[in-house]
Amino acid sequence: VQLQASGGGLVQAGGSLRLSCSASGSDVVHVRTMAWYRQAPEKQRELVAAITRGGSTDYGDSMGDRFAISRDNAKNSIYLQMDNLRPEDTAVYYCNAANWDYSTEWWGQGTLVTVSS
């Protein structure tokens, strides 16, 4: 599975961004869960949000209600709407996909989000 993420950029604090990730490849039919992770400088990678093929969602503990994940199964794509962004949201955001039993994961190349104060 190949994951192509887009939508990152520079935004002022309080602004919004929408990230997109599209999955492709012959194994895409085996993908159940897709997710966004992020990694800030000198910090561990952390879960932002995940969504299953059926639409069940899960958010990282520190994400609050500013982020919303959605999915379009017909397009094999997920989206992350990020509102009221803060400087501490600055990170590289990675798209992730996992198969039905989580025995296989795929990662995208990451997209940089920079929030200025």
Image: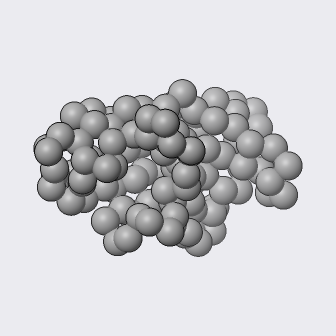
In x, y percent, where is residue 34? 60, 52
Q: Is 9 drawn above or below residue 19 in the view shown?
A: above
Front residue of this view, candidates 94 and 29: 94
Q: Residue at x 84, y 58 (%)?
A: 101
The answer to whether residue 108 is visible is yes
In x, y percent, where is residue 35? 57, 52
Q: Residue at x 55, y 51 (%)?
A: 46
Q: Is 53 drawn above or below residue 35 in the view shown?
A: below
Q: Residue furthest front?
A: 42
Q: Residue at x 37, y 32 (%)?
A: 112
Q: Residue at x 14, y 45 (%)?
A: 117
Front residue of this view, candidates 42 and 105: 42
Q: How many marks?
A: 0
- Horizontally, residue 4 falls left or right of residue 116, namely right
In x, y percent, where is residue 67? 36, 62
Q: Quadrant of the N terminus?
A: top right
Asked where in the image residue 114 lies, by quadrant, the reply is: top left
- Horizontally, residue 7 falls left or right of residue 40, namely left
- Horizontally, residue 72 falls left or right of residue 23, namely left
Front residue of this view, candidates 91 and 16: 91
Asked where in the image residue 10 lies, by quadrant, the reply is: top left
Colour convention of the picture: one colour
The answer to whether residue 29 is visible is no
Front residue of this view, candidates 36 and 99: 36
In x, y percent, where is residue 51? 57, 62
